[in-house]
Amino acid sequence: MGSLIFDVQDVTLRFGGVVSLNNVTLHQNRGEILAIIGPNGAGKTSLFNSLTGVYAPQEGTILFTNSQDKSISVIGKKPFRVSNAGVARTFQASRMFSAMTTFENVKIGAESHRGLGVVGAMLKGPATRRDDRNSDQATKELLEFVGLTSQANTIAASLSYGARRRLEIARGLATKPEVLLLDEPAAGTNPAEKIELAQLIRRVRDEMGVSILLIEHDMKLVMSLAERLYVLNFGSVIASGTPDEIRANPVVIEAYLGSADAGVAEETK
Amino acid sequence: MKNFFGNPRLQRYGRTLLILLLIIVMTGPEGNGSQPTSGFTGSFGNHMSFFGFFYPQRWVVFVLLAGIIYGVISSVKLTVHWWRNRAIFRGDTYQRISRTVVATKRRSRLKSTRLGFYALGLAFALYFPHLVTDQSWQTLVVQDVLVYLLLALGLNVVTGFAGLLDLGYVAFYAIGAYTTAWVTGSLPTPPPFGVHWNTFVAIPVAIVFAMLCGVLLGIPTLRLRGDYLAIVTLGFGEIVYLFINNSYGITGGSTGTNQIPFLSFHLGPIKYLWGLIPEPYYYLTLAFVVIFLIVFSSLEHSRVGRSWVAIREDEVAAESLGIHPLKYKVMAFAIGAASAGFAGVVTASQTLFVTPPTFTISFSINILVLVIFGGMGSIFGVVLGGLVVQGFVAYLTHSPPSVYNAADLYMYLGALLVVMMIYRPAGLFPSRRRLRELHLIEGGVAPDTLQVEIGAHRVQEDV
Amino acid sequence: MSYFSSHFATLGHEFWGLLVGGIANGFIYAMVAIGYTMVYGVLRLINFAHSEVFMTGAFASFFLLKFLVGNSTPNAFESVVYLIAAVLIGGIVGALVALLLERVAYRPLRRRSAPKLAYLISAIGASYFLYNFVGKEFGRINLSIDAPYTNNTVFTIFGAPVQTYYIVIFFVGVTMLVTLDRLVATSKLGHGIRAVAQDAETASLMGVNIDRTIALTFMLGGFLGGVAGFLYSIPVGAVYGMGFTPALKAFSAAVLGGIGNLRGAVLGGLILGVVESLSVAFVSGAYIDVVAFGVLVLVLLVRPTGILGERLGRSA
Ligand SMILES: Nc1ncnc2c1ncn2[C@@H]1O[C@H](COP(=O)(O)OP(=O)(O)O)[C@@H](O)[C@H]1O
Ligand SMILES: [Mg+2]
């Protein structure tokens, strides 16, 4: 393949005087597991929000290309349109529908791309019932895939951290995306859960063919998982390359030693 | 001194006393501007009968009543307390385990209980006109209970399912009623195509018309914060009222419409005319209520219903999954509008004349009370709550007791809203999901959709 | 074409008179709008019961003036004293009712951080309770106010008479608005209000007493609202349902100026008052109330943040 799924050119995002993204240029290949790293406040989440239509950067272009080679320009599109085009995401502070069960959470994702169908919904016609059964089936399979089958009927608010992360991944996958954006999926999980999570992410790519864009602070996880990385600092891309290249990059080490977050430095030593 | 007044028990007594005083005044005689204290002094000083035993001053009666109620509540509490304690002595662990098992069992049983209740209720409703043969009662039940239920079920879609506050709901009801008058040729303006249509024709016309107004009003305002919708709809309700009350050439103005024909149909050999007798209208309106119940229940448990919940719970997350929040909100708003429009047809075809005073903003508040009382978002709750409140109001209208003045209805309804919001925000018969949502919001776990000010993509505009 | 030209002719003819009346109304809207905007600042919600603060203020002044003036014709000194007394009592009762509202309809919900919908419903309930309660106790007919002065023409602007009533509104309005502006900008209380508006959590960490600040915010807005109610009722009288329409307009004014923005509320109120007054030339009397609503919808469509922009706590 080799085609680009995300092509980001010279993107600048400002909030009043604060420059969250400064001339960011990056690209992701189809089928790639790509990671974004950088200290807190570097603009990683802002980048995700820009890629999903939550924020509209003032300058630059963001092109998303689907597997049918159709490109859309993300900037100026509403989040639901970007989602419909094939981009799914999770949130840094996980946002589930906490009063719903795990099953319902994922089902919402599975059926959100269909039309409105209000009349069908009121009359419960055969087509609506069939749709409903299909969504149930898809939901079951996804819960199986992420390993939440036993907690299908648990209220989302009472799930463990690790389970919530997996729930968010399942919910995102339910929208049948081509790329999945994960914002610090390992935050708040224990070491065992981290290993499971890494396996899950790789399986998402390998078995479902979904490209992965990943923000993560845990260097061990990132370096083992990502095929390529970009390093953000103060809104700018300061380095990019394979894990080995990044580890050896003096600019990166500098940036990480400069901040309190010395993960990379420790990792290199 | 501060300690003395800070004593929680004292505060509780103080609050109880204040509430008692308020109730005495609320149920007291009407006052007037030239003798501003007469209402208050009369509330305490006038005499009233204590169940026919004796005839003391009003305040004595209320104090006695309060004492009796307090006594009953305390003894019930005491009994319950004793019963619980007795159970605890029989082995704590065993009790706890068995209790959780019961809880899960009860949950699965809930649905069938509900169905059973509906079946029983329907059977009772079908038999009702034979039970209460007084026609003035039957009319009240149709016009003040069943029609209100239709309206409440519709508003529940807007407020309960989608979490939107529509205070101009009455406007769509008015649109439905006046459309009926228009279509049947009962307005000063000529009917469409100059034909006096059958009243049934008004149903689709009114629904489409009300829905259209809902969509046109909803699209610009539903993009904004939730509370702006409330005030815009309030203004809309006021405008519709001004219009029907003042445009004599079109709506008949304050004198109201001409006579609207009875409902009737005439299909080949089958024909039927709903006349002045309330009973046939009773069955027809009941049928409409049942249809609303079925349709809105399936809506609640459909993809659309779940999307509303998702938007209500976390709009940003819902949008990230591809749900178009505005589309769903407008849809809910339009469905509510259409229901009210439909109810307007039902009313117009029964009351023969339609006049503006029916359609003041207060009416929206009345419907809101029904939705809140039972438990917004729970169809079962809304039906039950609507029956209780409107049944009681109908009783008060039919045979008002000495302490009740019909002009004070909205004073009581307003107070009821505040009391509900303070003590039972999820309503008396809440849906389990709604209750859970509320607990989570109040525990700070779930974000409050209305609190998440504007969809995040609008944040930049503010800066 | 001729429709408009004839209407503009009417407008030209009466322009100055309409302008003066519009500005006077504008001050009243501004004083009510401030109450909405301040509460919006600290709680992020529309205080639906603010209309009843307005109404009760008018009733308080009505009773006081009935007691003071009665059938007498006050002399100049008495006029001023009675007027000040009526303004104060209207304001004080307005503030007390606002405080009561905060205590009963809002605070219990705030305690358990209820969803916003609950606040709105509670406030609407309180509003319905209050105005119908007043209707019950004091009658449901219009009570005409015993004005403490005779409404003479004081001077004319381009032939338009300016009566005592307008002078009173102007003086009271300017005094109130300027005082409030200074109070919020410079006093410790004002600092607290701004801090809460910006970020309640941080403010509370900084030692601001949130409950007290919110209560005082309600009272300040209530004071102005009560005074506005009195001023409004002088020519038209007091009646239990009088709050609804002016309050809806004042809210439109607050949004027009930029909700949360004190000066915006004043600007919005004045603009709305003038626009409404001038539109008399184009809109028939029965529909004059629609103008404000039209303005509201227009603002929400074109610039939802208002003329001066929303300012939730950034400054006065
Ligand atoms: N909605 C917003 N309004 C104002 N500033 C924002 C907003 N979102 C992000 N920022 C700013 O952008 C910068 C980058 O933040 P973020 O993208 O969350 O960083 P990261 O995810 O790398 O920790 C921060 O300085 C933050 O304050
Ligand atoms: Mg982040």
Image (spheres, grey):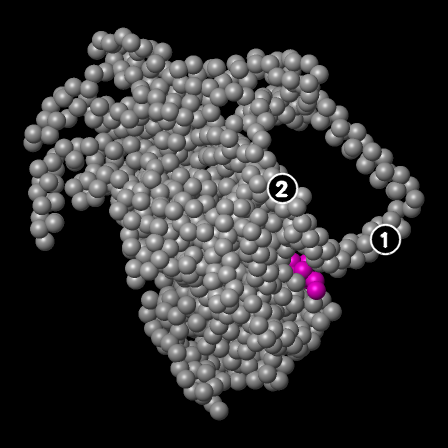
Does any atom of ligand 1 lie closer than 8 Å to the CB of label 2? no
In the image, residue B188 lies at what x, y percent? 29, 49
Look at the image and give the residue range highlighted in magenta.
Answer: A153-162
Above or below, comparing residue B337 to residue B29 in the picture: below
Query: Dot 2 falls on which chain?
Result: B
Identified at 44% across, 32% down, the residue is C218
What is the number of the mark on residue B98?
A: 1
The N terminus of chain B: image quadrant: top right
Residue at label 2?
B133
Above or below, comparing residue A3 to residue C281 in the picture: below
C149 vs B115, nearest the viewer: B115
B110 vs A165, nearest the viewer: B110
Q: Check chain identity for marks 2 and 1: say if they share one.
A: yes
B381 vs B327, nearest the viewer: B381
In the image, residue A227 lies at what x, y percent? 54, 82
Judge left or right: residue A4 versus residue C230.
Answer: right
Secondary structure type for disc 1: helix
The three-letter amino acid code for the residue at tag 1 is Ser
A104 drawn magenta: no
Identified at 57% across, 72% down, the residue is A125
Judge left or right: residue A73 versus residue A214.
Answer: left
Identified at 71% across, 66% down, the residue is A151
The C terminus of chain B: image quadrant: bottom left
Density class for disc 1 (Cα within 10 Å; few <14, some 14-19, many ≥20) is: few
